[in-house]
Image: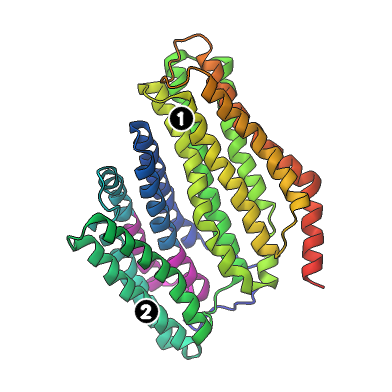
Amino acid sequence: MSGRDPTERGRSVTPLELLYDLTYVVAFAAASDQLAEQLARGDVWRAIGAFVFAVWAVSWAWFNFTWFTSAYGTDDVVFRLATIVQMIGVIVLTYGLPVSFESAAHGGSPNNLLLVIGYIIMRIPLIALWASAAVQDPRHRKSSLAYVWIISIAQVGWLLTAILPLPTVPTVIALVVLALAEMTAPIAAARRFGHAPWNAGHIAERFGLLTLITIGEVIAGTTAAVGALIQAKDWSPEAVMIAASGLVIAAAVWWTYFLVPSRTVLEERPERLFAWRNAHFPLFGSIAAIGAGLHLTTIAVQHGGVSLFGIALSLTVPLAITVVLIFLIWSVLMRSFDLTTHLPLLLATLAPLCAAVVVGLLVNPGEPLDLSQPGALTALSTVIGLAALGAVVEVVGHELVGYEHTLRAWERSTT
């Protein structure tokens, strides 16, 4: 563990990293499914709070592994075994997510002992790896030891919030403080002791792959919704429309995200990585929430109890947030903010999403979706189709206008 070359160009993700990421397919799916089920019960704000905590917990676990791997990924026997143990911890964490949502639904803390045990399983080998790096890489010893202490102290804090019988409000405040401390302490340590030898281009690729995994939740949600629909009503033009629209939403989110030249810029400007990284926390959540909206559609078709307005909101709100966050990631990365170019495109993208909400509000307002009623299936396909149209507008607009603007912003930043 002498440290990887932080300036190496073209560094690729390893098969071991891809294997590790597979556990996050399950973790994001669990968070998305739990959000949909809680929304169907009507526990909107508590469900959103538990979902935010779940996305942060899952994403931060992945961040920790990615940061170390980018700096010291040796891919030897010890590192592989340590990675497999961390994968076990992710699965244990995933088992704790239903407990987290159920506790939040009853006014309790979203943190629980099962989640913490999952984190402990992940962090014991990670702490050992950072300690090993401190011994084997004298140039970055202080930085590696800082990570050892930060992770260890934070984990004690998470354990205490799970086992101490504190009221809900103080516990939630403690969770927020711990989360902020974990996010800011590594930055402070890097400024004092120097950065670990992570590779900005490698990290950009890793984040892109996790984004792809999260987009998979949109495809999974589409498949489940259409499957439930054809079981209830058999194949119809509306079912085909919903299937196509869901896939278009997934493809458009992928297209829009990868229009941002993250790897190219970060390899030249690695100092922009931390702000760019933090903008991905809500992005992973918003993309997974689109999948939850499609899962909510499945629940509405199979069990009822969900209005078309609720389905419209659950789809359009996370999609709108996703578009805004990708714009924010672009702005942070390019150090540019041009309302004359991006604001009209953003408004054009949001217009079909607003129309979808209006349709959901006007068709049988306040009543659960009932596919036996005339026009209900058409209204449902219209809502999902309008959401897909908004995503398409974003892609087309960026290809026609945004790409040239990106080139100009990059030229300005390099001159």
Q: Is residue 80 magenta?
A: yes
Mark 1 or mark 2: whose residue is earlier in sequence:
2
What residue does disc 1 label? 310
From what the image shows, is residue 30 above or below residue 410?
A: above
Asked whether, in this view, residue 269 is left or right of residue 225, the answer is right
Residue numbers of the magenta segment: 63-90
User: Mainly helix, strand or loop, the magenta region?
Assistant: helix
Q: Nearer the viewer, residue 275 or 245?
A: 275
Q: Residues within 10 Å of mark 1 (few under 14, many from 20)?
A: many
Q: Amino acid at mark 1?
A: Gly
Q: Nearer the viewer, residue 168 or 154?
A: 168
Asked whether disc 1 touches disc 2, contact meaning CB atoms under 8 Å apart, the reply is no
Q: Secondary structure at mark 1?
A: helix
Q: Is residue 38 magenta?
A: no
Q: Amino acid at mark 2?
A: Val
Asked whether, in this view, residue 35 is left or right of residue 356, the answer is left
Task: Looking at this view, name the residue that lies furthest to the left.
Answer: 165
